Every structure is written in C-alpha cells, then in structure tokens.
Image (spheres, grey):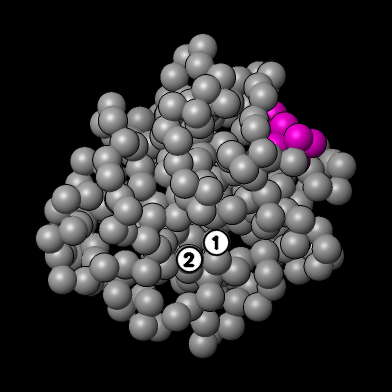
Amino acid sequence: MSGLYTALVDDAGLFPPTSLHMDEALARNRRDLERGNPVLTHRFLCPASRLDRLRGMDYRPRRIGLIMDMPELPAFDDLPVDLVETPLPDGTPVETLADQLGLPDEVRLFAEVVPPRKMAIDVPDGVGLKVRCGGLTADAFPPVEHLGVFIRFCVESDVPFKATAGLHHAVRHFDPSLGVDRHGFLNLVLAVCEAVEGRDPVPVLRATDVGHLVRLARAVPEETAKQARRLLVSYGSCSTSTPLEDLRTLGLIGEAQ
C-alpha cells in the first residue's frame, strides 16, 4: 500500500453527521483496532466535554485526540491523549495559545484556523494547524482557492496540519442536499503532493475526474508522498469504513486492507 494512505483517517464517530453514542463509537473503534487496517490511525477523537463519559467506559482507545469544546482544558494525564485540537481565537497568536494551554511535550497542539485569501501567521515549532473542509451547511465548505492558500502556506512554511469535516468521500462531488461541492480526501492528499512539488494545488482540489485523480495518485514519487504525509498528519472522518471502501473501489489499496 502506498504511504500516501498510511495512518490517514482519525475516528470521528462521535461527531456529526454520524453522531454515534459513546458506547457505539468505542465498540467500532475496538473492532477497527482488532482488524488493524493501516489506513486508520485508530485515534479516537473526543470532545473535551465528554472526557468524563469516556473515562466511565470499560474500553479505552489506544490513542485519543482531544477536541476542545469548552473554555478550560480538562485534566487528561490518565488517558492516552496525543494531540489537542482547538480553535484559534481571533487576534490571538498561535504561540500565545500554546503558552496558555501548556501541553506536555508529547501532546501536539493543532490550532484551527479559517483559511483566508492570504495567510500571514507565525506557527512555533511543534505546533500544527487545523482546517475545516466542510460541515452541516454550505457556507462551512471553504472555496478551493482558500483551501489552496492554506495548503501552500503549510508546505512553504513547513507546518504540519490536520483536516476535519466534510471529507466524506475520496473524490470531490456535488451534494444536492446542501447545494455545494464536497471536497474529496484524495483531492486533499494529492493537492499537498502538488504543493510539495512546487505546483498550484487548486486544480487538483477542484478535479472531479476519477480516472485522472487515480493516475495522479499512482504516479506520486515516494519522496513526495513521504513529505506530503509528514505535513498532512491525518483527517477526521465520522465513518471509518467509507474511506477504505472508496480507496478499494479506486484500486488504490488492496481488498485485504
């Protein structure tokens, strides 16, 4: 399997639109871990407000990504938290946010930003950014031009990033229920590869030709894939099966994976 897809998908089963109950989400995470598919990180994304509920369950995920949805950072020393994702308040420097949270060295901070037409932001070493690629309404989906600006910034500034929301399928497609084009996770991965090689990521973000995207994916050099995935850490998906099904259908991973 190409390194492009290794440890790509975080488990966001608690979040919309799937919105599983805690026991259902943990049961799925456990099944996924037992199956050991290499595309999945098996990192369980959990809102900070539901951490106590998680503590009360019999099963503990192997890795936890803490999603801040409350003013104060809860204690998590007893849990395998390896990253914290939190919105970056308007006007707050990323370094200030990192200092305020005071995370242990082994826990990475990802500050969520809204990609503008231009990005001018200082990101200290050891901190990453997070971009939202969709949501429950059409206006939650950033234009490809804005997402392209974000990707170019991260590549040129050597800033790791995570993505979340809206990446339900591999290839960009129209969603008639929202009246919007949904970004594809394969488009996103390949757009990072394009930026790594010094090209504009926007055309690939906009592409809907499945055959073209598959050919691009198969032609990505190993070193480009390695650099792209060092920067694109992972993305959160409310489904852990759909990404695998899509990659199998496209012939980009084997049936056994």
Q: Residue at x 21, y 71 (%)?
A: 59
The residue type indicated by label 2 comes to: Thr
169, above or below 173, in the image: below
Which residue carries the number 1 mark? 8
Which residue carries the number 2 mark? 41
| Res. 221 visible in picture | yes
Residue 220 within the magenta-colored segment of the rendering:
no
| Res. 152 visible in picture | no
44, above or below 27, in the image: above
Whether pointer 2 and pointer 1 mark residues with C-beta atoms closer than 8 Å, the reply is yes
- Asked whether, in this view, residue 28 is left or right of residue 226, the answer is left
97, above or below 73, in the image: above
The residue type indicated by label 1 comes to: Leu
Provide the secondary structure element on which disc 1 rests: loop
Camera-nearest residue between 90 and 217: 90
Give the magenta part as a residue range: 149-157
- Asked whether, in this view, residue 145 is left or right of residue 237, the answer is right
Which of pointers 2 and 1 lies earlier in the amino acid sequence?
A: 1
Q: Residue at x 48, y 68 (%)?
A: 40
* Mark 2–mark 1 distance (CA, rounded to whole Å): 6 Å
